[in-house]
Image (cartoon, grey):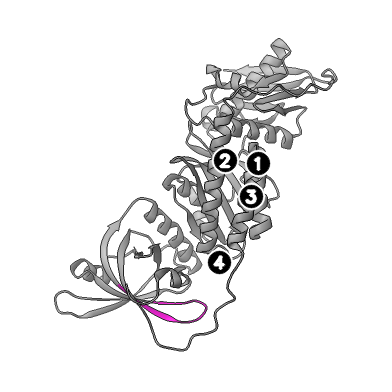
Amino acid sequence: MNGPALGSIRPCLEGAIPAIMATTSAVDGMPNVAYISQVYYVDERHVALSFQFFNKTRKNILSHPYACLQVLHPVTAEFFRLHLRYLRTETAGPLFEGMKAQLAGIASHSGMASVFRLLGSDVYEVQEIEAVAGTALPPSPSRCGLLAALRHCSERLSQCTALDELLNATLASLTDFMGIRHAMVLMLDPVTQRLYTVASTGYATSGVGAEIDMGDGVIGVAARERTPVRIMHMTSAYLYSRAVRSSLCADAPDLALDHEIPYPGLREPHSQLAVPVLSSGSLLGVLFVESPLDLQFSFEDEDVLVAVAGHLGAAIQLMQSGTEAAPAEPLPAAPAPAPSGAPLQVRHFRVNDSIFINETYLIKGVAGAIFWKLVSDHVQQGRTEFSNRELRLDPALGLPDVTDNLDARLLLLQRRLAEHGAPIQTQKTGRGRFRLLVQRPLELVDVA
């Protein structure tokens, strides 16, 4: 391929300025020129264009698969011509879903959300790139420090020995080294195939425990397709203003108690980037960042976050495999006062293992089942010391055989109890061990 490398003109493909595409008719050679909403970088030899209408451009390409695309650098105002050859159209998969998400942002920003609808992703081979002669504006100061930021993130994460440290270090690194103020980590529940928030930063409320369905919005699409999804403009199609409500009301319509954990996202985000957290080909969760400003996350930010997510996934997997080793001896228990005061009612709904402390919803699912086991053993046997291993071996908890995410569930439970300020807390006492701290007598109510 002659001319500049595709990667060197990648800012032209960020969607800030529409591209112009020229095709010719295979019948009479008549040229046709049209604006293209989206030019999507695939790799150094390929781009994908948005297929939205079956028009003259589409007809020409299907009969004569060659086109010329003119793009403009948004900062230097340099023009480039890309000589393309059409290869195929994709209507599903990571490429299509990524383009669909970005197109929604472009459409909303331009007031054309009702018109822009992606029918397919047309993949082209870039045969030549031609720089158009002209006077360029001065380039913006080169952005530096991303590689250093990645190094600092990696060094900080490599020092972590527990999941809570790892998640806190990840979010702190994004803030300290990349200036990202709003971020969260969600983990996948392999049983329900939903994502639940385990850590966040920059929000008024943590939203720990808030859930997102697979395929729902930027986060859900990134998880389902296992590909980064980045949007640069405000978009109502991918806006989360609250957590997806759980199925408790449908399962128990007579229960008139609020059981929603509010989603912690920004009320009006203008830039969003979701990156899947993977390990050994398996989806563990999603790393998500957002900003109230437009054009905040470039492809370089995406590259850094993909690397951070890869490190995070490997570390989570290592920690999970390490918990099967014999747990270390627990820390000696400090003398604790006997539970006193008015009894604390803990209600458990078997339909989905929802837990309510007095009249307030706490948690549900596997984490709810774990909590019910802990308080039941405490009331019946006086137990306060527990281990991860015994939970894994308990068939009543319904943990999956592979990738049970037990550490993440225990961390979620610990943080929900701390946020609730309940007189019941959990405390880590060693590797694979924890303690139940109970300040008031418990009254357990098991609802069928």
Q: Residue beneath label 1, please? A: 160
| Residue 244 seen in the figure | no
In front of the other: label 3 or label 4? 3
Q: CA distance from mark 2 to mark 4?
A: 31 Å
Q: Which residues are magenta?
A: 71-83
Name the front one of labels 4 and 1: 1
Cβ atoms at labels 3 and 2 below 8 Å apart: no
Residue type, numbered disc 3? Glu
- Which comes before the other along the chain, label 3 or label 4? 3
Q: Which mark is residue 295?
A: 4
Question: N-terminal of the two: label 2 or label 4?
Answer: 4
Say what secondary structure mark 1 lies in. Answer: loop
Describe the element under mark 2 as helix, strand or loop. helix
Q: Which residue is mark 2?
A: 315
The tag earlier along the polypeptide, 2 or 1, is 1
The quadrant of the image that shows the C terminus is top right
Q: Quadrant of residue 55?
A: bottom left
As measured in the structure, the alpha-carbon distance from the residue carrying label 2 to the one carrying label 1 is 9 Å
